[in-house]
Image (cartoon, helix red, strand yellow):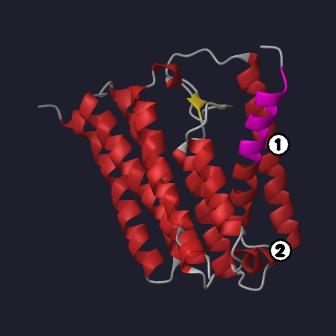
């Protein structure tokens, strides 16, 4: 049996392990390390697909393993990070962010059986949702006196964010993929979305550096911009 066939699955397994270790660090009060591990998991999530295409080693098992790994790194981990970022004394309210794990599972299951999502997405991808949750938790941990930390201490912001992200995960809103390749020709509409997102990401870097904010704020702004760009294109007709 060729060793190269196992390379993509090995990388996918590293994604899963990053998520598991990230959960441990988050539960121990280190969401900053948890977010770094989430980023490592995202890198593995990108590389396993690239390796599968390059080595021509795609398989049905690999696809299922990828979803299982994503469920841990981009479903369970962000839900726990969002839960840990809150400090509301109302238990029923504080536990609401955990619904994100359930909706992430629904999102991943929907993606696996929906043939319309081979080159782009319908609904918010779990990695994008995870990046918002992870970067927020990391920023609040690193800047406890910030305005975001005060928002998270209240009974409204985090539960509302969790509900909004959960609904976006299972929505039918078209969202562009950040992955290239696969033999698919990208439409003009998708290129415009990507350019708009790139502009927002660069602006996020500049603003974060100029304002002297923690680096995690870059991801929070950039992926919030990702959602807004896709929502804008869903509401306003653009030429293909």
Is residue 129 located in the magenta-colored stretch of the structure? no
Q: Is residue 167 left or right of residue 206?
A: left
Q: Quadrant of the C terminus?
A: top right
Q: Quadrant of residue 134?
A: bottom right
Q: Quadrant of residue 155?
A: bottom right
**C-alpha separation, residue under disc 2 versus residue under disc 1:** 20 Å
Residue 60 x, y percent position in the rendering: 27, 29
Give the number of the disc on residue 212: 2
Q: Which residue is mark 1?
A: 199
- The span shown in magenta is 225-237
Placement of 176 over or under 215, stated as above or below:
above
Q: Residue furthest left?
A: 1
Residue 200 x, y percent position in the rendering: 81, 46
Q: Quadrant of the N terminus?
A: top left
What residue do we see at 75% from left, 21% from top? 189
Q: Is residue 63 in view from this perspective?
A: yes
Residue 235 x, y percent position in the rendering: 81, 29
Q: Is residue 158 left or right of residue 239?
A: left
Placement of 115 over or under 228, stated as above or below:
above
């Amino acid at each position: 049996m060729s060793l190269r066939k196992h390379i993509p699955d090995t990388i996918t397994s590293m994604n899963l392990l990053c998520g598991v270790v990230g959960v441990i660090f988050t539960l121990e009060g280190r969401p900053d390390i948890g977010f770094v591990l989430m980023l490592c998991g995202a890198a593995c999530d990108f590389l396993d697909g690239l390796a599968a295409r390059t080595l021509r080693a795609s398989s049905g098992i690999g696809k299922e393993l990828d979803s299982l790994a994503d469920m841990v790194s981009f479903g369970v981990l962000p839900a726990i990070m969002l839960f840990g970022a809150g400090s509301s004394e109302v238990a029923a309210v504080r536990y609401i962010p955990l619904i994100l794990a359930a909706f992430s599972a629904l999102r991943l299951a929907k993606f696996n059986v929906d043939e319309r999502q081979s080159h782009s997405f319908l609904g918010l991808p779990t990695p994008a949702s995870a990046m918002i949750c992870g970067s927020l938790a990391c920023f609040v941990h690193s800047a406890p006196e910030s305005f975001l930390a005060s928002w998270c201490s209240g009974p409204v912001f985090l539960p509302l964010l969790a509900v909004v992200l959960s609904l976006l995960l299972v929505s039918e809103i078209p969202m562009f993929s950040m992955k290239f390749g696969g033999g698919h020709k990208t439409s003009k509409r998708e290129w415009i979305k990507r350019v708009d997102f790139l502009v927002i990401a660069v602006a996020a870097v500049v603003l974060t550096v100029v304002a002297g904010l923690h680096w995690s704020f870059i991801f929070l702004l950039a992926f919030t911009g990702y959602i807004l760009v896709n929502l804008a294109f869903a509401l306003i007709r653009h030429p293909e």
